[in-house]
Image (spheres, rainbow, N blue to C red):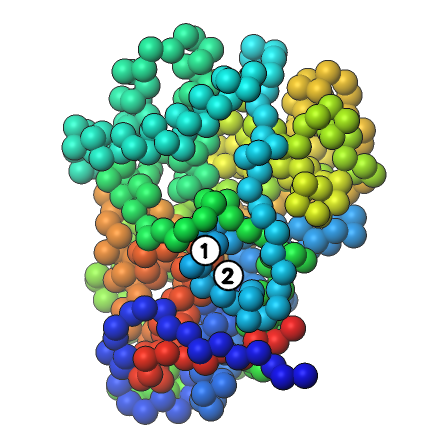
Amino acid sequence: MDVPEWEVDDGSPSLREGVVGPVERVVVVGAGLAGLTAANALTHAGVDCVVLEARDRIGGRIHTVEVAGHPVDLGGSWIHMPVGNPLTALTERAGIQRVSGDPTEQLSAYDCTAGRWLNAEEWEASLTMQYEVFPQAQAELADRLGPAASMEDAISHFLAHERLAEDDMRRARQALHAVIEAEAADLASRQSLRWMWNEDEFDGSYFGDLPVGGYRKIVSALSSGVDVRLGVEVSAVSWTASGVEIGTASGPVERASHVVVTVPLGILKRGEPSFFPDLPPEHRAAIERLGFGRFEKLVLAFDEPFWQASGVGHVVVFPPDAHEPAIWVLGLDSFGSGPILEALLFHTSAARTLHHSAQENSDWLLELIGQALGHRCPDPVSIVSTSWTTDRHSGGAYTHITPWGHPLDCDQLGQPVGGRVLFAGEHTQSARLAYADGALTSGIREAKRLLATPSVRLVLGE
């Protein structure tokens, strides 16, 4: 059987800009989407290339696990805006099936404080406010509040001019904070108003598609033929005019002509790995200014989808604490993944998973669901609670632009240093910041740079 190949370009005009010396051997630090993509292109172009991955698995913040026999993505899961998205093209080339991941048609809402479900008219009005009216007001709010305004400022100003009853106002605030915390993986006070929704957009539903079998299918396809060494934590990157040396926590040193560093922004913020000489001031300032917050998931598997008996597919819960954002709970059975509830815990709510046990988190969520359904929920057969925030190799979820930052900070982090040290990852470009496809195209960009070619060839495995 022929192995599928994909001739692909990331759209960037630069070729060899920022690279010195012949490309003889490349070390890639990190086996996430960016690292695997760069290594795949380099390897299949005949370059001696090795990937050093600190974890005992590939994928980085893409992590598909089996929960009660069903695949569940604990990290990235959607191919957002799939029409024209390079990840859609990749799945088509690799023969990976997709299903719609848009929950909105089966989405209902329950208000714990009021003790009732929102009717269809109320919920439709809320969704329109969240995803149409408020975003459309962004430009006017930015002009009025100034370049340093946060999304917290915007929410407060927007709602102050809305004529809403007390319960409607509370829900609107909870809903808008959920929208921003989901987008930014951080508090609305730490997200820039001016640079909110600044990324390029593709076509199709925002939620888009889910790869059947999970994102691991994409990760596996990109790892085809790539030399990945697991359990190797890079501690230092040193470069001179003639090459690089990569120090590891276990001791051995890798030598190469160039290195592509793809560790998440959260790790760079921690000062890891060490760089010798130190990164230029403009890189260090960009790392400092950019934000990197938290977003966790709580996954509960059951013997059967008991929520369907009440006519519920997915539910947005407005929690009793008015200071908490709305919580989205998805029934993954609607997407073909079995009788599983997945709660998306945005920045504020994500603190719960870090300070409570998986069982305590499950009890809390099922109490809310039981209140909505009017009966006690059955016990789950399996519970999985993520901890990306405290994960040593991620340090959080994904990148956002702070009120004191700028999209150019991301582009700065995509610039090579010393002609030998290159960077890739969702945080190294502003066009698709925080998206998995942004990580993918950043890997293509750096492979193009090293190969001095207008496009690269990816060989996709099963």
Q: What is the secondary structure assignment of the residue under circle 2?
A: helix
Q: Contact (CB < 8 A) between labels 1 and 2? A: yes
The residue lying toward the viewer, choosing from 405 and 445, is 445
Q: Amino acid at mark 2?
A: Thr
- Tag on residue 112? none
Find residue 152 and report its horizontal and vertical position in percent. 32, 29
Residue at the spot 60% in from the left edge and 16% down from the top edge = 117
Q: Is residue 281 left or right of residue 400?
A: left
- Tag on residue 83? 1
**Is residue 192 shown to the viewer in this render?**
yes
Q: Earlier in the sequence, mark 1 or mark 2?
A: 1
**Vertical side of 267 occupied by 278: above or below:** below
**Is residue 254 shown to the viewer in this render?**
no
Residue 138 image-quadrant placement: top left
Find residue 31 and report its horizontal and vertical position in percent. 53, 69
Residue at the spot 53% in from the left edge and 32% down from the top edge = 349
Find residue 99 and report its horizontal and vertical position in percent. 61, 51
Quarter occupied by the N terminus: bottom right
Q: Amino acid at mark 1?
A: Val
Q: What is the secondary structure assignment of the residue under circle 1?
A: loop
Residue position for label 2:
88
Residue at the spot 48% in from the left edge and 72% down from the top edge = 37
Question: CA separation, marks 1 and 2?
Answer: 7 Å
